[in-house]
Image (cartoon, grey):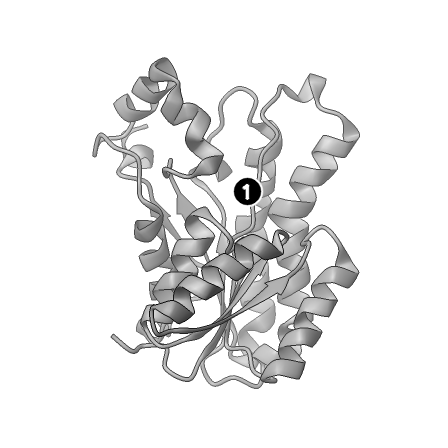
Amino acid sequence: MTRFNNRYVLVTGAGSGIGAAIAHEFAREGAFVYVVDIDVERAEDVAGQIKNAGGQALEVQADVTDGPSVKAAIEAIKAHSGKLDIIVNNAGMNVRTDLRHMTDEEWDLVLQVNLVGGARFARDGFELLKNSDHAAIVNLASVMATRSTRQMSAYSSTKAAMASLSRGLAVEYAPFNIRVNYLCPGFVATNLTSRFVRNPVVKEQILNRTPMGRFGEPEEIAKAALFLASDDASYMTGSGITVDGGMMAAL
């Protein structure tokens, strides 16, 4: 498929996990992918894999928690192509602890990575996006945006805020023909969830709450992200899609 021929896509947190899967899927469908990650070696690795498979990609180092770093990444894209059609704000992390034990530094880190970084890219990439005929932003929220469990308060709060930010930006950016939507993945087999996969008790609890009886794969989230970014979703903005194996339906 070539839904994204001649389109330029920026994916944050693209050095591993869901972000890497999203980068690969866009490249397979013809996009030029800016592989953005704080770890430039991981970004180079993913970009290299894409190019070895016949795709087009460029690694871009950026720390989403640092405003000047985000601006520098956008400037690098301006210098390289001057084009940007799609932003996927995927970068995310968690500090798993009860809030009463969480330090200010830990709280700020979760907030900056999961929410503020995405807001920065949506803001600083605006001038490029508004020149596109197919502009879209896809933000990664989570099923934890509306549900929570112990030691997930900071994560849940930031993911709920990301969903709210997406709806707000959808209204704000609509006059410029920039669509903004978000995804709510369930439990997906990545480094972020590896501790759950390794713990047989926790793993069983999660799978018992998931009607499909398994963790999701990064590629399954990636395909949903591509749908929201594509012309197939041309009348969708401010919407969220849940990709969770039925977990939310069963709660």
Residue in the image at 32% along x and 52% along y: 219
Residue in the image at 34% along x and 21% along y: 203
- Residue 147: x %, y % from top left: 46, 31
Residue pointed to by mark 1: 160
Q: Quadrant of the C terminus?
A: top left
Q: Residues within 10 Å of mark 1 (few under 14, many from 20)?
A: many
Classify mark 1: helix, strand or loop: helix
The answer to whether 85 is drawn above or below residue 239 in the figure is below
212 left or right of 59 in image: left
Q: Can residue 183 be seen by looking at this rendering?
A: no
Q: In this view, which residue lies farthest toward the top?
A: 201
The answer to whether 14 is drawn above or below residue 209 in the figure is below
- Residues 30 and 100: in front is 30
Residue in the image at 42% along x and 49% along y: 18
- Residues 56 and 251: in front is 56
Q: Can residue 222 be seen by looking at this rendering?
A: yes
- Residue 138: x %, y % from top left: 48, 61
Q: In which quarter of the image is the N terminus?
A: bottom left
209 left or right of 96 in image: left
> Which residue type does callout 1 highlight?
Ala
- Residue 94: x %, y % from top left: 58, 34
209 left or right of 95 in image: left
- Residues 193 and 47: in front is 47
Q: In this view, which residue lies farthest toward the left?
A: 212
Give the quadrant of residue 24: bottom left
